[in-house]
Amino acid sequence: MKIAVYPGSFDPITKGHTDVIARAAGLFDELIIAVSENPNKSPMFTAAERVLLIEESVKHIESGNCKIRVMSHDGLLVDFVRHCKAAFIVKGLRAISDFESEFQMASANQKLAPELDSVFIMTRVEYMYLSSSMVKEIAKYQGDISALVGPHVVEAMDEKFNRGMIL
Ligand code: PNS
């Protein structure tokens, strides 16, 4: 059984994330999407909301024999990965600018848990520029985010903004 954990803030999940999930599903028997609670980042959506948005986003993915699960976690990623009995951490890699921080995180995780491997999936060119922060920035100014996130995410963001939330 090849089990992998795909961790992130997913605040909110974008089409770039969904693409990485679909492709990772072709590589592993089980893929656990791990939503980091990370209160330091003051996320727009609660962890529970982010889990629901991801579940809706991955529903349509033809995952073949791969079982996809979505969970939230707090604390060290490697502890969660070990708890899941996974051997791999999946991350998406966009531009070179991602490399430095991803290299740093992968190195720290390797030091903490040498038995785990980080696996990087190169983002498709059309999603190279896409990030959750960019989606929030565009939505904040009433821009059209429908090409960047699923329709249920557009709806959830509209709801947040209608409630007068300030980013
Ligand atoms: O989507 P993001 O914000 O780039 O994801 C970052 C995340 C959640 C994967 C990273 O911050 C993380 O692994 N946090 C858990 C805490 C941890 O284990 N830190 C040490 C490894 S760098």
Image: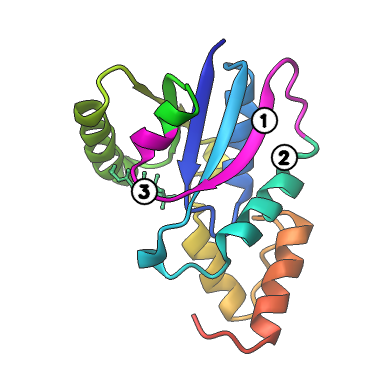
Mark 1 = which residue? 68
Give the amino acid type for the residue marked by disc 2 in the picture.
Val
Callout 1 crowding tier (Cα within 10 Å): few <14, some 14–19, many ≥20: many
User: In the rendering, at what x and y percent does residue 54 appear?
Assistant: 66, 48
Dot 2: element: helix
Dot 3: element: loop
- Looking at the image, is mark 3 or mark 2 earlier in the sequence? 2
The circle on residue 58 is 2
- Looking at the image, is mark 3 or mark 1 earlier in the sequence? 1
Dot 1: element: strand
Give the amino acid type for the residue marked by disc 1 in the picture.
Ile
User: In the rendering, at what x and y percent does residue 56 appear?
Assistant: 76, 48
Callout 2 crowding tier (Cα within 10 Å): few <14, some 14–19, many ≥20: some
Number of the front mark, 2 or 1: 1
- Looking at the image, is mark 2 or mark 1 earlier in the sequence? 2
User: In the rendering, at what x and y percent does residue 142 appear?
Assistant: 65, 79
Number of the front mark, 3 or 2: 3
- Name above or below for residue 38 compared with residue 54: below
Q: Which residues are magenta?
A: 61-80
Q: Is the Cβ of the residue at disc 2 closer than 8 Å to that at disc 1?
A: yes
Q: Is the Cβ of the residue at disc 3 closer than 8 Å to that at disc 1?
A: no
Disc 3 C-beta below 8 A from ligand 1:
yes
Q: Residue at x 67, y 30 (%)?
A: 68
